[in-house]
Amino acid sequence: MYILVCGGGKVGFYLAQELLNAKHEVLVIERDPGRAGQIADELSSNILQGDSCEATTLDAAGVARADLICAVTGDDEDNLVICEIARQRGVPRTIARINNPKNEELFKKRGIETTVSATQVVLAQIEQELPTHDVIPLLQLHSGLEIIEIRIPETSPAAGRSVRDVLLPAESMISLIVDPGGVPRMPSGDTRLNAGDALVVVTRKDSLPMLREVLIGSTHGMDT
Amino acid sequence: MNVLIMGCGRVGARVAAMLDAAGHQVTIMDTNPASFRRLPDSFRGRREVGNGMDGPALEKAGILEADAFMAVTQGDNRNYFASQMAREVYGVKRVLCRIYDPIREKIFSELGLETFSPTSIGAQIMFDMLLGQQEEK
């Protein structure tokens, strides 16, 4: 594959190195001449010095025959513009780095589905590490679905009831129950939910408040 | 009309003052409060310190009530980003966006934004001025 990496910072540099190792054809575009020179020394000249937000730079990089473009600069507005121009030039796949997680919505609305946010990843990791959280995000799926873990507290309205009797929000599914002893089980309709069980649930992000109400009860704890 | 302007440079300050004088409700935002010195003393609109690419800052500046949004900072990409936020996330009806780079301006206008490039417009005016002068001689 021919892959354009826009932004030669640490993310762009190591990404390009990995892609070259995987035998892809890679070109890094870096605006800063000093940094571009450094990369030229280390990546045996798979580098173009220029502003990847300018269509002329992307054209010089052969954007029209690129299979994939990775916009990984430190500025979300630049990454959005790079993806928009690349798409207009016919690049079939774009991946954008997002620095401010709040900007993900705009990228999605602009049809740039594949976004990577280090901030979001670290945040999710912190939430996993914090035992006070009753809802732990495990994985975000790109279809808008999310896999989360919920621990059933003593006060849960669902404790002591069977899976069938718990009214979950639409498009939500309890896919695994891990009991306090650490034994995992695939639930059926008859499986009883007990306090202390950890449930792995597939759900939609906007269903979280309702899911919390049904499985945890009063909204104690911090928002995720 | 309720107009939110991002960027209090020469153009932003001037169009803000013009709209205000014409009786419209104007809010102008800039990351640097010193920029508001460019507004005339007679300006009755709101001055908001904040980054127009930041959702909460836009909301504080009243984007939810705005009928129109204008992006006139020095950065083409910032203007594009904020304009798409105004349009796609906040549903503002009229969004005007300044893009210096004529090539980017053309691409962004094809993507449905109301854009203008002072570079193209300025070059055209100078071209016409020069040729006009030649013809008079």
Image: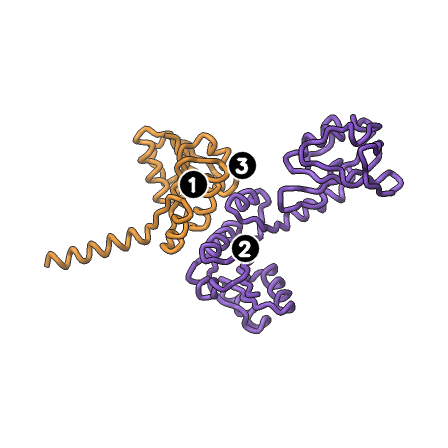
Q: Position of residue A204 (x, y in %)?
A: 66, 38
For mark 3, give the secondary structure: helix
Give the side of residue A27 with respect to residue A205, left or right. Answer: left
Q: From the rendered image, report the letter of the chain displayed in orange.
A: B
For mark 1, give the secondary structure: strand
Give the side of residue A204 with respect to residue A29, left or right. Answer: right
For mark 2, give the secondary structure: strand
Q: Looking at the image, can residue A133 be seen?
A: no
Residue A189: mark in rendering: none
Corner quadrant of residue A15: bottom right
Question: Label 1 crowding class (10 Å Cα cut-off): few <14, some 14-19, many 20+?
Answer: many
Q: Position of residue B112 (x, y in %)?
A: 41, 45
Estimate the spatial distance between the alpha carbons at disc 3 and disc 2, rounded to whole Å: 27 Å
Q: Nearer the viewer's eye, disc 3 or disc 2?
A: 2
Residue type at numbered disc 2: Thr
Q: Looking at the image, is mark 1 or mark 3 earlier in the sequence?
A: 1
The residue positioned 62% from the left and 42% from the top of the image is A144
Q: From the rendered image, report the letter of the chain displayed in purple.
A: A
Residue type at numbered disc 1: Met
Is the residue under label 2 in contact with that under label 3 (CB below 8 Å)? no
Residue A94: mark in rendering: 2
Q: Which residue position is annotated with label 1?
A: B6
Residue type at numbered disc 3: Pro
Q: Which residue position is annotated with label 3?
A: B56
Residue toward you, A55 or A128: A55
